[in-house]
Amino acid sequence: MGIKKYSFRSDYCELAHPKVLEALANVGRAQLDSYGLDEFSLRAGELVKTKINAPSADVHFIAGGTLTNLVLISSALRPFEAVVAPESGHIFVHETGAIEAIGHKVCVMRGEGGKLRATDIEAVVVEHCDEHMVKPRLVYISLSAESGAIYTKEELLEISRCCRKNNLYLYIDGARLGAAMNSPFVDLKYEDIANMADAFYVGGTKNGALFGEALVILNNGLKADFRFHLKQKGALLAKGAAIGVQFEALLRDGLYDELASNAVAMGLKLADGIGELGYGFLYPPVTNLLIPIFPLGVADKLHMIYDFYDWQNLGDMTAARMLTSWATPEEMIDGFIADLKNIG
């Protein structure tokens, strides 16, 4: 039990799916146009637009999620405008104050189960009532959320209506969009998101890509001169084809959803096994991100053979954050459940 057996710390421990690496290797010596204007990026952009049924969308490929959030939000807001987000939102907790560093306040609300509600947004708008305070202008949510939760179609529709009523942009962080959209509990389609959001991104880094996200801009008011924002923020990659090639490989034959489906299936099997042994969860498991609750002694023994985060201290218990990935084999899930049974 002294040797680390498997990591459940994140869904990007594995470098990339073999088909993605093969696609990159196949074009490694080709001469290509730069800055995302190569044939692979252009084709991948069309595949994204087809997948979400939004032919008029603009698609930009960006190296990572933090950079994608930074560029989109900074381009959308004037200096005195602010973001509304759940208190667990990635831009508020895990991006080193990137949004605040460019001069924009993040107004956070507790939400429910890691999700922001339309009533939360309304409360922020009402509170920020005049020019002596920042002006809320953009709503940030994640799909799936940092709790692993997913928004229902009705919840997302309520948020979208609230944003339109209050002249707010709706921006969705899609780092784990694939997992959310392949959950058996989801009632959304990709095109629903395109119809409700002003911008969102399709995450690749956490779903089989070496790196890269596909930012989709739906609102015409956010499209103009966006490549200038990319360049100024260091996000206009000279070898942009390195992302385009990957997304074409992921989207061309359905690999993207296939990989996400494995991540979710393994996550829910892990959740079932943990639940059957009598352990609870901080939030109901619906995707590949689980937050089970273990006694400290059990968690300490599990740490000897598995990697995972201690997410929240609960006295003599700990809430652990565990993720399965596109590459998680079923035998590892069976092994963890067997070890947990023996430890408990």
Image (spheres, rainbow, N blue to C red):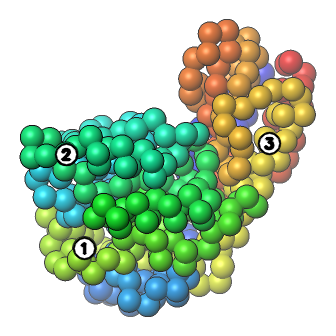
> Mark 3 or mark 2, which has the lower sequence index?
2
Q: Which mark is residue 284?
A: none
Residue that carries the numbered disc 1 in the rendered image: 222
Helix, strand or loop at label 3? It is helix
Quarter of the rendering containing residue 100: top left
Quarter of the figure that contains the C terminus: top right
Labels 3 & 2 near each other (Cβ < 8 A):
no
> Mark 1 or mark 3, which has the lower sequence index?
1
In space, the residues marked 1 and 3 are separated at their CA atoms by 41 Å
Helix, strand or loop at label 1? It is helix
The residue that appears at 66% across and 31% down in the rendered structure is 282
User: Does the image show residue 197?
Assistant: yes
**Would residue 208 be found to the left or right of residue 302 on screen?**
left
Q: Position of residue 297 (x, y in %)?
A: 73, 11
The residue that appears at 76% across and 61% down in the rendered structure is 184
Quarter of the rendering containing residue 33: bottom left
Q: Position of residue 307 (x, y in %)?
A: 64, 31
Q: Which mark is residue 129?
A: 2
Residue that carries the numbered disc 3 in the rendered image: 270
